[in-house]
Image: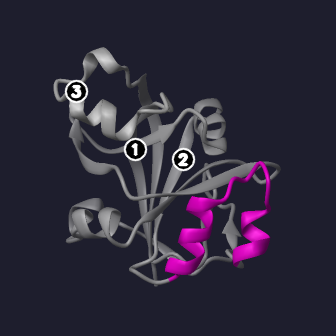
Amino acid sequence: MSSFKEIDISTLNENFFRKIGKEWMLITAGDKDKFNTMTASWGGIGVIWGVNASFCFIRQSRYTHQFISDNDYYTLSFFGGKMMEELTYCGKNSGRDVNKIQETGLLPVFDEQAPYFEQAELVLICQKMYSQSMTPENFADKTIVDKMYSDSDWHDMFIGKIVKVIAKV
């Protein structure tokens, strides 16, 4: 039994610039039988098509990419600036090669459409609505291509409807 409760998204007063860019988040997709998680410091929260949504960006080479592509739901787990060592590990190591859960002591919870972690303070459960590959011809600022994609390891953008917000009780 997890120690989370559902909260109304309209009550959030979070600074997602800080939460995503400085404290980071785990993007997780899959099910109890097979899932993967990765650390992200890029992304956003906003409104599109009249719904509250998350925007996340995953390189096509990342193991998590296959899980978010193959599943209808994913979670964004926020830890409030805690567990930075574990988040660093999850960002630098691939689930193809290591068991991130075992190595970090993260405790997965499986009571939603996608896994999240008991140590999180805030979790957004998202239903995938849209995905698109980033391509060099779509960049107005070509210096980004040179700086971020010199190896052609492109990101795909995923937009998900935030269907539920849960917070640590």
The residue at which mark 1 appears reads as 56
Q: Which residues are magenta?
A: 83-104
Q: Position of residue 5 (x, y in %)?
A: 47, 74
Q: Are marks 2 and 3 in contact (CB under 8 Å)?
A: no
Pinpoint residue 15: horizontal percent, then vertical percent. Answer: 21, 69
Q: Position of residue 14 (x, y in %)?
A: 24, 70
Q: Residue at x 61, y 64 (%)?
A: 90
In the image, taking residue 109 as reference, residue 125 lies left or right, namely left
For badge 2, the amino acid type reads Tyr
Can residue 49 be seen? no
Q: Is residue 31 visible?
A: yes
- Dot 2 or dot 1: first in sequence order is 1
In the rendered view, does 107 fall on the left or right side of 87?
right
Closer to the camera: disc 1 or disc 3? 3
Residue named by callout 3: 142
- Residue beneath the point at 54% across and 47% down: 74
- Label 1: state its secondary structure: strand
In the image, taking residue 94 as reference, residue 117 lies left or right, namely left
Q: Residue furthest left?
A: 140
Q: For the residues labelled 2 and 1, say whether their Cβ atoms are less than 8 Å apart.
A: yes
Q: Main secondary structure of the magenta part?
A: helix
Q: Secondary structure at mark 2?
A: strand
Mark 1 and mark 3 lie on one chain; the one further toward the N terminus is 1
Q: Is residue 99 magenta?
A: yes
